[in-house]
Every structure is written in structure tokens, then in C-alpha cells.
């Protein structure tokens, strides 16, 4: 079903969006023409730039395959689309990334993998936190690649592979715990793994990996040395595996921070997460961030927007919102946005955050409610009902980066991106 998104007669200030519904989301194309067909929607949405997403993927691929290396086989890219694609829409961004050349995809669980597969993605999908007993048959049915992080999981996966039948073995990747103490077999348990693998005739090891705990830290501290120690443990385990005559398949280690700043960790494949969506992680020391941004320029993919649905004048001394945490110190003009923490505006931005409105930073005032957010627009001339505010993202030539917003409230960028709720429509702009 095709239709035009339209926010009401007095709200169509930015032109119309022609869109196609896809699993509750929309693929949008800008148009300067207003459509006679109107569909009124609650005026909050997340605009996802597929061109920015594609740019970031291509930039990462070029970066990790420098021509001077003269590799016979280019390094592969495993695009992390877990957490609903960091809030951007997992199946939708995965499909766009597959079209742009991503080699693999990474999700958290079987359900996420099935969603991406049913969204039309044909490339391999790695289930990063593996499966729980009972899921293995679904995993095999949908051609999802399991991660083994406990040796006893192999028997279950082997049984599911045997039930499926066929001569082709079911592939899986092995995760090695190299010091994060979260998931993965201990680096010293490779021999135990090899014995179990020999019993599993329906399985094939096609990859081995680990995960860094602090690849963004470069201080002369124990944490700053942790990444190098993890590398040593990992390659020690890899050497023992090969000594036992086992082909590890594709080797991958590097997450976003390691991709940008630790080329020695690139191996056969890299796993970009936050950088795919336009944001570098935080670094220690902070100067590393500027260096990273200069090395690998990125484009923010998502812009979270809402419209002004109410305006009112508040006298000096009057409180605004729950518990009157904001009290007007002068005659104040308050604008109300049709979005709150139930949509993904972090509640801790109350009385400390800003949004972009008419090209200016406008302060958020009062406690953010589940469904609405208040702004002080006293110093912005001519604000009207229906105008668009950008909570983070791009607005013309202006940008309010999500990582800047995240740092201001002491959290990480992914926290903001993943917080955009299911009730917020995603508009996929070419």
C-alpha cells in the first residue's frame, strides 16, 4: 500500500513525504509537492538516511582495506544490526547494507536473526549471544550462524543439524573469552573444544572471534593495556587450534573503536557497530576522538524529530511540568513537543538538554514526560505550532550529534539510538 505521510493542514511546512509501508516502517522520498491525500499521524518520527548509512559502510570498507597492503582477499565487513539496528530498524538497515555490499550481519538472538532473514537478507547472519536450549532448530531452519560460547552447546546444535538432514554441515563460529569474562570458552579450553568438535559430524567451524573490553582506552593503565593482553590470549588460542589441525575459518576481533584506531586487530573481518550509524565511540584520552573523526569521517544516519503541538505564555514565578522543576524567571514562552521519554527522548535531558529549532539550540525545560517535552522558545522569534524540532541529528546545515547529547548526560550514543521506541515511525530517506 502506497500513501503520503501528512501531518495536518497547518503542519506541512517541510513538504510531503511519499512513503511505502514495510513492516510498520516507511521508505520515504522527499517531495516539494503537497499531496491531496492526507494521513494524519502523531507528529514524531525518526528520519533514517540510507545514503548516509551506505556512505559509512563504504568508508569503513575502504579504510580497512588500504591499497598498500595488496591483500589477495579484501577484509570482510560484519555489520552489527542488533538492538533493532541500533534503533534504526534492524531488517530495514540490514537490507540496505546488504545491497551496499555488507558481507555478514550480527544480531543478538535468534528472534532478531529471523526478523532480519524474513526482511529479505540473504547474506550470513551471526547470532552473537548464541542460542538457549530449544532454539537450535529454528536457528538451523532459518540458516542462521550460531556462536558457540560453551562446549556443551555443540551437542544440541549437532542434533538439530542431524534432524535437518542433508550432506552439508551446519556452520558455526567459536567465541573465545580473552579477559572480558562475559561469554566465550576460556582460551585454555581449546583442546576440550577440539574433542567435542570431533564428535559433532554435522557441524563445521567457519569462524573464530573474541570481543574487546576496552579498545577505546589508550592510557598507561591496566585497562589501557587490556586490549593487547586480549590479543595475545586470542592468538595463543588460535595457534593451539591450528596445531590440532582445525581450520578456524574467518578470524574477527575488531569492534568500532578497534577498527578506527587499532589496525593490527583487523584480521579477516571487522565488526562495525556505532560507526556504521555515524558515531565514533568515546576515547580515553579524549584527544583520540578528534584523531578518530579525522581518520574516518562519518555521517549521522538518524535524525529524531517532533513538531510543536502547543504554545503558551507563562508568567514569572510559574512552574512548568511535573513537580515544577522549572520555574520561569521572566515572562516565558513555552512550546510543547509531541514526544517524550516513551518515544526515546532521554528523561535525564530535562532542564539540561537542547533541541534544534529554527537553526538554534533551544533549551528543554521541566521534567520530560512520557509523551511530551517542553521547550523555552522565548528567545526564538516567531515559533509557530507545527514547526519541526530536531532532538538530535541534522537540520539543514545544522547538526546536533547524538554522541554530543549522550556525553552531556553521561551515557553512550547507543543508549540514545536504541531508546527510540517502536511507536516512533522510521522514515527511510534515500
Image (spheres, rainbow, N blue to C red):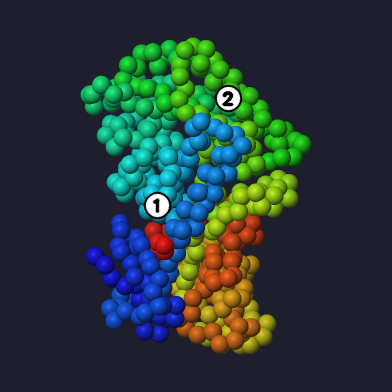
The reply to whether residue 274 is visible in this rendering is no
- Residue at far right of view: 220
Which secondary structure, mark 2? helix
The residue that disc 2 covers is 234
Residue at horizontal 34%, vertical 45%?
121
Q: Quadrant of the C terminus?
A: bottom left
Q: Which residue is drawn at 25% across and 21% down?
A: 167
- Is 314 situated above or below 59? below
Is 203 or 50 nearer to us in this picture?
50
User: Disc 1 to disc 2, how far (Cα)?
Assistant: 33 Å
The image shows residue 324 at horizontal and vertical percentages of 59, 75
Mark 1 vs 2, N-terminal side: 1
Q: Which residue is drawn at 30% across and 64% down?
A: 20
Q: Name the residue under label 1.
A: 96
- Does 242 sit above or below residue 382? above
Q: In terms of image quadrants, where is residue 364?
A: bottom right
How dense is the environment of label 2, judged by Cα within 10 Å: few (below 14), some, or many (20 and up)?
Answer: many
Locate the N terminus by quadrant. Answer: bottom left
Amino acid at each position: 500500500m502506497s500513501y503520503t505521510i501528512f501531518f495536518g493542514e497547518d503542519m506541512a511546512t517541510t513538504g510531503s513525504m511519499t512513503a511505502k509501508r514495510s513492516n510498520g516502517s516507511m521508505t520515504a522520498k522527499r517531495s516539494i509537492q503537497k499531496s491531496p491525500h492526507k494521513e494524519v499521524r502523531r507528529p514524531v518520527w525518526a528520519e533514517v538516511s540510507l545514503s548516509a548509512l551506505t556512505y559509512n559502510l563504504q568508508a569503513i570498507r575502504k579504510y580497512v582495506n588500504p591499497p598498500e597492503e595488496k591483500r589477495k582477499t579484501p577484509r570482510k565487513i560484519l555489520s552489527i544490526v542488533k538492538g533493532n539496528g541500533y534503533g534504526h530498524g534492524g531488517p530495514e538497515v540490514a537490507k540496505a547494507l546488504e545491497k551496499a555490499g555488507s558481507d555478514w550481519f550480527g544480531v543478538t538472538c535468534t528472534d532478531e536473526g529471523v526478523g532480519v532473514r524474513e526482511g529479505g537478507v540473504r547474506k550470513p547472519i551471526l547470532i552473537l549471544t548464541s542460542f538457549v536450549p530449544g532454539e537450535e532448530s529454528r536457528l538451523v531452519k532459518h540458516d542462521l550462524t550460531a556462536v558457540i560460547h560453551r562446549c556443551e552447546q555443540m551437542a544440541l546444535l549437532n542434533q538439530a543439524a542431524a534432524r535437518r538432514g542433508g550432506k552439508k554441515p551446519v556452520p558455526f563460529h567459536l567465541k573465545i573469552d580473552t579477559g572480558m569474562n562475559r561469554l566465550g570458552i576460556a582460551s585454555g579450553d581449546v583442546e576440550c573444544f577440539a574433542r567435542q568438535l570431533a564428535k559433532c559430524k554435522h557441524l563445521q567451524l567457519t569462524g573464530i572471534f573474541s570481543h574487546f573490553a576496552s579498545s577505546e582506552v589508550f592510557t598507561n593503565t591496566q585497562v589501557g593495556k587490556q586490549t593487547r593482553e586480549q590479543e595475545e590470549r586470542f592468538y595463543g588460542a588460535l595457534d593451539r587450534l591450528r596445531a590440532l589441525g582445525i581450520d578456524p575459518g574467518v578470524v574477527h576481533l575488531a569492534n568500532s573503536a578497534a577498527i578506527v584506531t587499532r589496525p593490527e586487530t583487523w584480521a579477516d573481518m571487522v565488526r562495525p557497530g556505532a560507526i556504521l550509524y555515524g558515531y565514533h565511540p568515546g576515547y580515553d584520552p579524549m584527544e583520540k576522538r578528534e584523531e578518530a573523526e579525522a581518520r574516518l569521517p562519518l555521517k549521522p544516519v538518524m535524525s529524531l524529530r517532533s513538531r510543536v503541538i502547543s504554545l503558551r505564555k507563562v508568567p514569572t514565578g510559574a512552574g512548568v511540568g511535573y513537580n515544577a522543576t522549572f520555574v520561569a524567571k521572566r515572562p516565558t514562552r513555552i512550546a510543547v513537543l509531541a514526544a517524550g521519554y516513551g518515544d526515546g527522548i532521554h528523561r535525564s535531558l530535562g532542564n539540561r538538554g537542547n533541541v534544534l529549532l529554527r537553526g538554534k539550540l533551544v533549551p528543554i525545560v521541566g521534567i520530560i514526560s512520557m509523551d511530551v517535552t517542553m521547550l523555552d522558545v522565548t528567545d526564538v522569534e516567531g515559533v509557530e505550532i507545527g514547526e519541526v524540532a530536531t532532538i538530535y541529528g541534522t537540520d539543514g546545515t545544522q547538526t546536533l550529534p547524538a554522541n554530543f547529547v549522550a556525553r552531556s548526560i553521561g551515557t553512550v550514543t547507543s543508549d540514545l539510538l536504541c531508546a527510540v521506541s517502536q511507536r516512533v515511525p522510521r522514515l527511510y530517506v534515500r
